[in-house]
Amino acid sequence: MKKWIKGAAVFGLIFFTAVLPVRQVNAQEENRILAGIYAEDMSLEGKTAGEARKMIEDYIESISDHVITLVILDGNEVQVTPAQVGFSWKNPEIVEEAAQIGQTGNVVQRYKAAKDLEHENKIYELEFDVDRELVKTILSEQCSVFNQEARDAELSIENERFVVHPGQTGMVVDEEASLELICSFFHDGWNGEDERLELAVTVDEPRGTEEELSKVKDVLGTFTTSFSTSGSSRSANVRNGAALINGTTLYPGDEFSAYEAVAPFTAANGYYMAGSYLNGQVVDSLGGGICQVSTTLYNAVLLAELEVTERHNHSMIVTYVDPSADAAIAESSGKDFKFINNTEAPIYIEGSTTDDKHISFTIYGMETRDSSRQVRYESEVVSTTYPDTEVIYVNESLPVGSISVQSAHIGYKANLWKVVTENGVEVSREKINSSNYQVTPRTATVGVATADPNAYNEIMAAIATNNIDHVKNVAAALAAAAAPPAEGAPQQPDGTPVQTPAQPAPAPQPEVVQVEEPAQ
């Protein structure tokens, strides 16, 4: 009996060994993947893990140059390849898993794994991914160029009447939604062929109806300043700034930036070189005079009682408005003049200039203030500081006798008050701003370049007095001496002209020159 049992066990072992469809391998020979195992529709039968991985990678490379057409707006298209969006294989670990099926466990376990594959194939799905940053770049740089931004309805004044210009519906690529759509497409839905993919689009309706814009008919505030003393370049800059702002329509809640409206300060944008403030000096810069534009608008905004959100005074005083009634804009120092339409209706800004050099801004809207209520603004000078020194700069590259003088600037501290009256009786007084304007001394830049040591010593002695008017007299005498003598002028025996000694000038009184600055 024991012999029979032992024989049966040996027979069973021989039977399983004979029928088990798993090839015995040497220790050095790599396992081969069993029949019935697939990656997508690719059979991995008989391949080592390395061979299977290479086959899948070759497949991925072969589909990476297919064309995916991104359909945008109005039939616009952008074509990309999977390689351009960083297409990659996300689950390479399936190869090792496939190679282990039927290769581990005891004889019975391996036999069962092989028999199971005869009844049902094991199919692995390939998972793909893309580089989200590359997709974002394509969406922002290639697809967004087809965006059609919404254009709100606008107003204009034609023949002294308001005309409504209808808006335009905007259609914009929704970059965030389109990013998720593209990622999901490659991760879940791509079949490896050329495809068309319609991107997500956001529809943006314009603001403004004819009924809403018809409310704009009342003058809320108007203000005028003069630039009659300005030269041609500065005058051109003032006219250009007014034209750039003219015709602006602002809806309730909109914020207006004077800097954004008139920038950039370039010749291409209509600007010329003109005087501006820079570090307490008057220098020429593109756009000099533009601050008279923002200042005039500021005062119209104050009278309209709109909400001012940003305002800066000039570094030095200006003359076309009272102290503290100015509003500077400066690219280099980040100064801007901003306000919000805090009314319940749209407003329209009209900017104009006249032949006699006046600039005006008028703000139209829907008047809701009581007619008995009046608003005015009062400037209060708190303190005044006069310059008590003079500064002389020596320039060795300029010829002796040349001199350029910049006038002094008086320093001020000032407040601006808003005064409200009802039926002529003052009911409130509110301080709107406080401004500090720096004091700067009178300065002169004097040329000292000469081959004549006597002339050099004379001009340097004049400079040492620190009296600009005396230096001006000496410089004038030296310039006259260097000039050819006029016919009939008295001469020395050697033929040189007779010079009149320069006399010291009385102590100077401060000169005040007023310009404004696009940059500080």
Image (cartoon, rainbow, N blue to C red):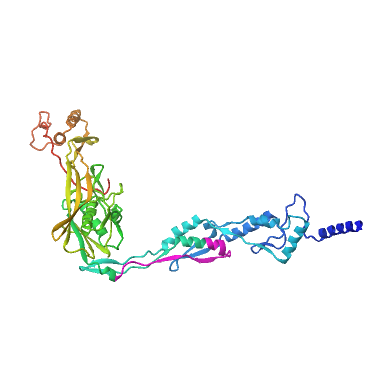
Residue 195 covered by magenta stretch = yes
Q: Taking 55 as reference, is 470 left or right?
A: left
Q: Nearer the viewer, residue 509 or 55?
A: 509
Residue 36 visible to the viewer: yes
The x, y position of residue 493, in whole percent, is: 10, 28
Identify the residue shown where x is 66% and y is 63%. Answer: 123
Using the rendered image of the protein, determine whether residue 236 is visible from the camera's viewpoint.
Answer: no
How many numbered badges does the structure rendering display?
0
Position of the C terminus, as image quadrant, is top left
Residue 477 magenta: no
Residue 465 placement (x, y as % from top left): 17, 30
Q: Residue at x 88, y 56 (%)?
A: 6
Answer left or right for 358 relative to 329. Answer: left
- Quadrant of res 361: bottom left
Magenta residue span:
183-210
Where's residue 505, x and y in %? 11, 34
Tell me the quadrant of the picture where the N terminus can be found: bottom right
Residue 346, x across and y down, in percent = 27, 64
Front-most of residues 221 and 506: 221
Q: Quadrant of residue 185?
A: bottom right
Which residue is at the front of the view, 373 or 267? 373
Residue positioned most to the bottom: 211
In the figure, residue 441 lies in which quadrant? Answer: top left
